[in-house]
Amino acid sequence: MERILVRLPGWLGDLLMARPLLHALRRLHPGAAIEAVGEGPHLELLAAEAVIDHAHPWPRGSAAREGLARALRGRPADVAYVLPPSFSSAWFTWRAGARERIGYRHELREALLTRALRRPARGELHLSQEYLALAGALAPAASGAHGAGPSPSKAGADAFPLLAPPPGAAAQAEAALAPHALGVRPLAVLGPAARYGPAKRWAPSRFAGVGRALTERGFGVLVCGAPSERAECEAVASAAGGGAVSLAGTTGLAALAALCARASVALCNDSGLGHLAAAVGTPTVVVFGSTSSAWTAPLGPRARVIQQAPACSPCFRRTCRIGTRCLEAVGVERVVRACLEAAA
């Protein structure tokens, strides 16, 4: 095999759960050129991993996407792994001319895939294991070594290295911290947002309660998120009191990875930030609501999940119709205790 194409997921958490597959492909095919198509900031985040030889940012316009497909068709891949479940992702790899196109059945895209696998029920395998199983479609002898056996958290710790922040990210993180005079205090990262929807968001007032408890114990608290989450993060930082600042929207993804790597603990919802903190090796506490920790728990040697699942869980809803009992059942004192234990 000389050339491999990987269509990467668009969600940050899913991307980080695809890292074991990328490392496995490098081990299985050390002489192949691995090309990846994904979000530009995500590709920059993986730049230091040495698992991608050619990175192609996903274009925004249809004409630019057609141009990328045409360029890839000029040197067609021997195999393409289609990680997103969308029809358009399979359509893109078909237009790119990949000879083998491997992915899971979804959205009637089987005709575009040469090997359309039946996806397990959500939570039967961790998502990282689902991705690894795609590699096993061409290398069944190797799939047992990567796609089954150890638990997701153990696989995350042992099967591939921690994510190293990109070059220059540490300096960017220091620049973001400089105006806030946090001194030499240990840092805690709080991520109160989750793009998926309210059913994944532990209450901001409870994040603020944890923030107050941590500042009282000498932590500097960094409330982080995307530009669209600035108001929510600023409200949490304000309610947490002195020693808490919001950095939402002020850092890029690389700097955010470096901030997480510097922190003594991170507390997040089931979100991209939670996956990022776990991937760089930060002691990470993640509160789960409507989704399944068996399916998408962050990978990392120091990640822990807090989930109080009622009978209706996991429902995978973006918005709950009965009051997010799963999230309401998780109290502040329990999460504070988990954060202090993780940071110890």
Image (cartoon, rainbow, N blue to C red):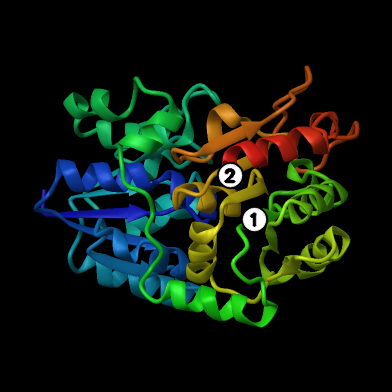
Which one is in front, 342 or 168?
Answer: 342
Query: In which quadrant of the rendered image does the C terminus lie?
Result: top right
State the residue position of label 2. Answer: 343
Is 82 displayed left or right of 255 in the figure?
left
* Residue closer to the observer: 81 or 151: 151
What's under tag 2, amino acid-wise? Ala
Is 245 left, or right, of 164 in this rendering? right
The local crowd at label 2, few if under 14, some if 14 to 19, many if 20 or more residues have their Cα within 10 Å, is: some
Residue type (three-letter) at the residue carrying disc 1: Ala
For residue 266, side relative to residue 245 (left or right):
left
Residue pointed to by mark 1: 188
Q: Residue 38: x, y in percent?
A: 42, 62
At x 26% / y 60%, what residue is drawn? 52
Residue at 83% over, 29% down? 329
Decide: few, some or many residues near mark 1? Use Cα within 10 Å; few <14, some 14-19, many ≥20. many
Helix, strand or loop at label 2? It is helix
C-alpha gap between disc 1 and disc 2: 9 Å
Q: Do the residues labelled 1 and 2 touch (CB within 8 Å)?
A: yes
